[in-house]
Image (cartoon, rainbow, N blue to C red):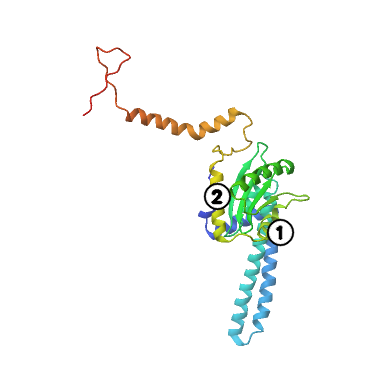
Amino acid sequence: MSTPVPPEKLSRRQQFVQTYRMAKKSDPRIGWIILGVFVVGAALGFVLFSLLPGSGTLGWVFSVVGALLLGLLAAVIIFGRRAQKAAYVQMDGQLGAAAAALQMLRKGWRTYPVVAFTKQQDVVHRVVGPPGIVLVGEGNPHRVKSLMVSERRKHERVAAETPITEVVVGDGEGRVPLPKLVKHITKLKRQLKPAEMTDVLNRLKALDANRSNVPMPKGPVPTSMKGLRGNMRGRCGLPLRRSSRLLRRSSPPLRWSSRASASEPVSRPSA
């Protein structure tokens, strides 16, 4: 079974094909829609460029080139929007969908996925940007709200003067649907300058440093101490074994005297 190639190692053509196949799973008509948009855009471009001054062969060349460019531009724009909509449809309802959607934020935003979670897999993500600190929760509405209240208190201790906004992802009253999450966050009121944002990021590093080092497991979070100890062994067991081997190698061997008792080692004279 072949391993999937990371997206950053694919060429533009391969990325386009992969995105088209992904979008076609939830939008089977996307191919015909893009073709129709290209034809309409090309026809409109031909008409517009034919109205420009010029005649003869040069005028026809400009009209054809302008038609192709305008049709291709319209097709690419529509394809991007349909593919994004299809991606939201496929992610909706899955764990971590909000974190994947937050990755679409542009430059000037910092996203920290899964800063807090529960054993029922309710998670809270953090976004830092011009509006301040935005806590994004996904999961059961009642459980995730209590989790967000706890996270809000922790953030207020290190960044008391920074505005904190809470957003719950989902369908229903008081929640933001996944396809509108990025647009909702970018429309929040801008209250931080770039220099202030840098100061907030430095303060949040201190908060994250005090969190537990136990990584979030794949799947359900362990509900017993036995599971947590297993995680700790998987994270720290190997370095401890390596350090013990290094200590045994670096410590000089002790020589025993025949006259001394078995419990009294004779020290080696210093050089």
Element carrying mark 2: helix
Expressed as whole percent of the image width and height from the top left, the position of residue 232 reads: 53, 32
| Foreground label between 2 and 1 | 2
Foreground of the two, 180 or 199: 199
Q: Regarding mark 1 in the picture, which secondary structure is present there?
A: loop
Instruction: Give how far across and how far down residue 183 sits, in percent.
Output: 68, 59
The type of residue carrying mark 2 is Arg
Using the rendered view, name the quadrant where residue 95 is placed. top right
In the rendered structure, find residue 231 and report the number of the disc placed on it: none
| Quarter occupied by residue 35 | bottom right
Amino acid at circle 1: Arg
- Give neighbour class at mark 1: few <14, some 14-19, many 20+ (Cα, 10 Å): few
Circles 2 and 1, Cβ within 8 Å, touching? The answer is: no
The image quarter containing residue 240 is: top left
List the residue tagged with mark 1.
29
Q: Residue at label 2?
A: 203
- Residue closest to the eye, 263 or 77: 263
Q: Nearer the viewer, residue 214 or 190?
A: 190
- Label 2, residues with CA under 10 Å away: few <14, some 14-19, many ≥20: some
Give the residue at x 23% y 24%. Answer: 269
Counting residues from the N terminus, which is met first, the one under dot 2 or under dot 1? Answer: 1
Residue 262 or residue 29, whichever sits in front: 262
